[in-house]
Amino acid sequence: MRIALEGEMRTQLKICCIQNEEELLVAHAAGARFCGLVAAMPSGPGPIPEDRIAALAGAAPHGLTPVLLTARSDAVGIAEHVTTAGVRAVQIVRTVPAHVRRGLRELVPGVTVLQVVHVVGPSDVDVADEAAEEADYLLLDSGRPGLPVEELGGTGRTHDWRLSERIVRRSPVPVFLAGGLGPHNVAEAIERVGPYGVDVCSGLRPRGRLEPELVNLFLEGMGR
């Protein structure tokens, strides 16, 4: 069972790969706490131009926090990306050392940092320990950063939830679970892993756009 943090009793929702203002409104109506705006990536669905990221970040309804997904991996580059996008939250999709996140915080005081951990094997449980340093949240995904063309998210694949559950149990910061989630398995994922929140992209976009009917089914699976 997930331990409630700061009085929050329900699993939080992050809807990723937002494409336009209509999808912002769908995410807001669904009660999502975060929405993901994907910048340039080596592969995967969802990237949008930088000017659209900035426009959507500025149009986000109150209570919905836009999160920039960046593939940059140095503090100066990430800070520049955050500032240009006009966001206050960033998801770092590559594995970076703690000093990068620390440097980012010095350059952008008050920024919220979601650090991705790609759960490939048992060693990533230890990787998650270091990833939690200077992070506000961990996000466990199913990418394969070691491939010739890196996969850094949006794969539509699940990973070994037994490893994710171990990370959740020992993490000092809240953990989002991502990777292959959809209406068909979100209830099981929450039950088995016990995450603070869940993150979904391709599982609600079988035809490339966010489908409100699937969002509603996903919410039902979350017990909302």
Image: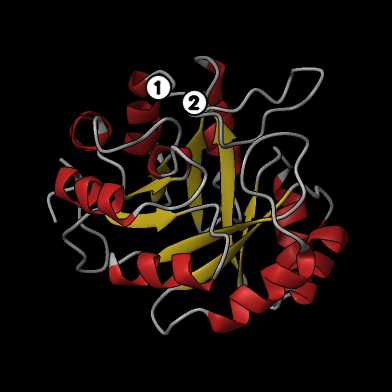
At label 2, which amino acid type do we have? Val
Residues at marks 1 and 2 touching, judged by CB atoms closer than 8 Å: yes
The residue shown at (26%, 37%) is: 186
Say above or below: 21 vs 146: below
- SS at mark 1 in the image: helix
Q: Is residue 74 left or right of residue 187?
A: right
The residue shown at (33%, 20%) is: 162
Say above or below: 219 vs 151: below
The N terminus: image quadrant:
top left
The C terminus: image quadrant:
bottom left
Tell me the residue that label 1 is attached to. 163
Q: To which quarter of the image does residue 171 belong? A: top left
At label 1, which amino acid type do we have? Leu
Q: Residue furthest front?
A: 207
Image x and y of residue 13, in percent: 34, 56
- SS at mark 2 in the image: helix
